[in-house]
Image: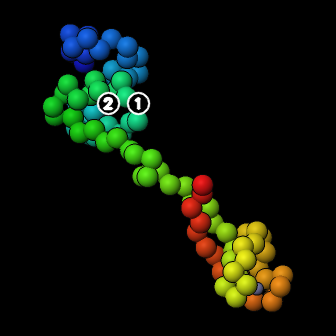
Amino acid sequence: MVRQKCIERGQNELSTADYSIIALGLQLRLPILSADYALVNAARYFSSLNILTPGKKNFVTKKTIKYCSICKVFFDLKESFCDNCGNSLVLKKEKMR
Ligand SMILES: [Zn+2]
């Protein structure tokens, strides 16, 4: 049914896996989370489907590092004390660039 409807709408560049995802979403009433443009577009033909398209800002990777609050210096995770002042390091989450 999904494949039929997509082809009727001129969307025929989807793989069998893509059709299956849409079909499962419909069957299980679960939202589809995808950044695949073709798949998201086709999923919009099915009004009962909920589609979540993650923007880049939703996928920020954070790296945990050690930090000396006195010297404002970052250290490797395996370090426990600051090389300069001996202060115990705190864990900090840093956004990766
Ligand atoms: Zn220090």
- Depth order, front residue of 27/10: 10
- Depth order, front residue of 17/56: 56
Residue 3: image quadrant is top left
Quadrant placement of the C terminus:
bottom right
Residue 40: image quadrant is top left
Say few, some or many: other residues with alpha carbon within 10 Å of mark 1 (under 14 / 14 to 19 / 20 or more): few
Q: Residue 40: which numbered mark, if any?
A: 2
Residue sitting farthest toward the left? 47
Quadrant location, ligand no. 1? bottom right
Three-letter amino acid code at the position of disc 2: Val
- Depth order, front residue of 43/41: 41
Residue 43: image quadrant is top left
Residue in view at x 19 percent, y 27 percent: 46
Residue in view at x 35 percent, y 26 percent: 39
SS for tag 1? loop
Q: Which residue bears the numbered disc 1?
A: 36
Three-letter amino acid code at the position of disc 1: Asp
| Label 1 CB sits under 8 Å from any ligand 1 atom | no
Report x, y in % for residue 72. Answer: 69, 80
Left or right, 60 with respect to 36, comes to right
Image: 78 above or below 55: below
SS for tag 2? helix
The reply to whether dot 2 and dot 1 touch (C-beta < 8 Å) is yes
Inter-mark Cα distance, 2 to 1? 6 Å
| Label 2 CB sits under 8 Å from any ligand 1 atom | no
Residue in view at x 76 percent, y 79 percent: 80
Image: 42 above or below 69: above
Q: Is residue 88 visible?
A: no
Report x, y in % for residue 9. Answer: 21, 14
